[in-house]
Image: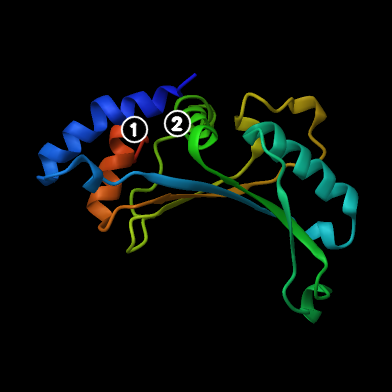
Amino acid sequence: MVPRFVEKYKHDIVPKMMEKFSFKNAYEVPRLVKIVINVGVGEAAHDKKVLDGVMRDIAEITGQKPAVTKARKDIAGFKIRKDSLMGCKVTLRRARMYEFLDRLINVALPRIRDFRGVNAGSFDENGNYSLGVNEQGIFPEIDIDKIQMVHGMDIAIVTTAKKRVEAFELLNLFGMPFKKAA
């Protein structure tokens, strides 16, 4: 079955973006490439059980097994050795990417306490968007009672947009709840 956001992109977003930015071809319209979810767990260097719990949570949220990330070099101040376990990451593409974005926008973000929108200034010069989430409990897949450790995650949404305005409009049309300018 085709994800809901794929249909929305093809039938709603592409025509609106072509009209607004006067693209001549539908293939010029920016699209999503991938979504990368990264979790850094510093305690994992000393206790592997912590990382196992984090990996289980990320796998439940994304539907995909995360890859373990390791330290690239020694950091004496944090008692970290090269190649010690530091966290995990998942790269979502195609249908899983659209399903995750749908759940993030329509279910998870509104569950954040005192939520007023995400920062519209978090775009890089290439049209990619990054946001941080403070706890994994906002996702409905996570059972709050089984959480070993509350952890945040970094979510990077990679697009083919050439400019920030195009990427902003793309995510805005998907329904990303950006903060209103004061």
Closer-to-camera residue (2/74): 2
Q: Residue at x 32, y 31 (%)?
A: 9
- Quarter of the picture containing the C terminus is top left
Question: How far is the residue under mark 1 from the one under mark 2?
Answer: 8 Å
Q: Name the residue under label 1.
A: 174
Instruction: Provide residue 116's location: percent of width, then percent of height.
Output: 40, 35
Mark 1 and mark 2 lie on one chain; the one further toward the N terminus is: 2
Q: Residue at x 74, y 78 (%)?
A: 73
For mark 1, give the secondary structure.
Answer: helix
Instruction: Provide residue 24's location: percent of width, then percent of height.
Output: 11, 45
Which image quarter: residue 59?
top right
For mark 2, give the secondary structure.
Answer: helix
Q: Name the residue under label 2.
A: 105
Q: Which label number is shown at residue 32?
A: none
Q: Are marks 1 and 2 in contact (CB under 8 Å)?
A: yes
Q: Is residue 93 left or right of residue 81?
A: left
Q: How crowded is mark 1: few (under 14 residues within 10 Å), some or many (20 or more)?
A: some
Query: In the image, is residue 31 above or below residue 46?
Result: above
Q: Which residue is drawn at 41% across and 42% down?
A: 118
Q: Of the residues shown, which amino acid type is indicated by label 1?
A: Phe
Closer-to-camera residue (123/59): 59
Q: How is the image coloured?
A: rainbow
- Looking at the rendered image, the disc whose residue lies closer to the viewer, 1 or 2, is 1
Q: Of the residues shown, which amino acid type is indicated by label 2?
A: Ile
Instruction: Provide residue 1's location: percent of width, then percent of height.
Output: 49, 18
Q: Is residue 181 visible?
A: no
Which image quarter: residue 57?
top right
Q: Is residue 147 visible?
A: yes
Closer-to-camera residue (11/49): 11
